[in-house]
Each structure stands twice: as C-alpha cells, then as structure tokens.
Image: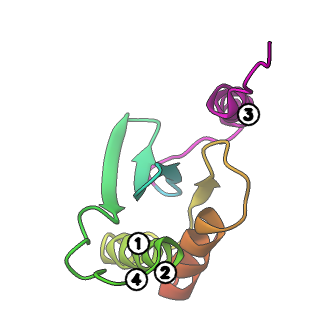
Amino acid sequence: MIKKIDKNADRKVRHERVRKTVYGTGVKPRLCVYRSTNYIYAQLIDDVNGITLASSSSLALSKDLQGKTKTEASEAVGLDIGKKALDLGIENVVFDRGGYIYTGRVAALAKGARDAGLKF
C-alpha cells in the first residue's frame, strides 16, 4: 500500500520549531503568514499582549485582485500589510513564515512588505 505524505503535518512541526525563537513585541511585532490553497493571509501580532495589530488577506482584497495570479495577489497583500504597519508607526517586524518554504507566494508577500517600507 502506498502511503501519502502529509505535508501539512510536516509544516506544523517546522512552524512549532520556529515559534520557539520567533517572538513579537509591541515595538517589533511578528508578521505571521498563512497560505491556503486559494488565498494568503498576513497578520501583525503582538505576542506580549496577545493581540493582532493589523491583518490583510487576498480574500479581503479580492475585488482589487481580479484577474491576477496568486503570486501577484500575495505581493499585493504584502504591500497592504506594510502600509497598515507604517500607519501604526511600525517599521521593524519579525517574519514568521508559518513553516512554509520561503519561495513562491511567501517570498512574494515578503517582497511586497519590504517594498512598502517594512524592515525584517
């Protein structure tokens, strides 16, 4: 019998390992990324107080992203979360890729956030 590899379980193990060291504060929050099959989500999280400071997703921006690829949508989400962070007076963040490999849509989101002015 052929066993199918559970890639999401492997991702969760990687994410737990990374979360032991990646920690966000009010001054330098954590930019957390979640990638589903259709959409990508990003949040700025203050782990000290346990609150979400700002969030953005390709689902929320879906009207503006008509006809764009998922990678282009990811870059737009990065730009949007970067603008929201700058409006809150946040320039530095800690990037939490959520256990995903830093390529494709995750890298595009990071590029968009850097283009908006975030430093990480």
Of marks 3 and 4, the one in the foreground: 4
> Whole-percent x and y of residue 38?
41, 56
Q: Which mark is residue 77?
A: 1
Q: Which residue is mark 2?
A: 72
Q: Nearer the viewer, residue 68 or 27?
A: 68
> Whole-percent x and y of residue 118?
54, 76
The answer to which image quadrant residue 88 occupies is bottom left
**Marks 1,4: beta carbons within 8 A:** no
Instruction: Say which amino acid is labelled 1.
Output: Val
Q: Nearer the viewer, residue 88 or 14?
A: 14
**How far is mark 3 from mark 2, CA to CA?**
26 Å
**How far is mark 3 from mark 4, CA to CA?**
30 Å
Q: Earlier in the sequence, mark 1 or mark 4?
A: 4
In-image side of 68 versus 14 (left or right)? left
* Residue at disc 4, secondary structure: loop
Instruction: Say which amino acid is labelled 4.
Output: Lys
The residue drawn where x is 61% and y is 63% is: 106
Q: Which residue is mark 4?
A: 68
Q: Nearer the viewer, residue 3 or 99?
A: 3
- Residue lying at the far left in this picture: please name it: 63
**How far is mark 1 from mark 4, CA to CA?**
12 Å
**Marks 3,2: beta carbons within 8 A:** no
**Marks 4,2: beta carbons within 8 A:** yes
Q: Is residue 49 above or below residue 1?
A: below
The answer to which image quadrant residue 92 occupies is bottom right
> Whole-percent x and y of residue 57?
34, 61
Would you call the spot at circle 2 few (<14 residues within 10 Å), some (14-19), or many (20 or more)?
A: some
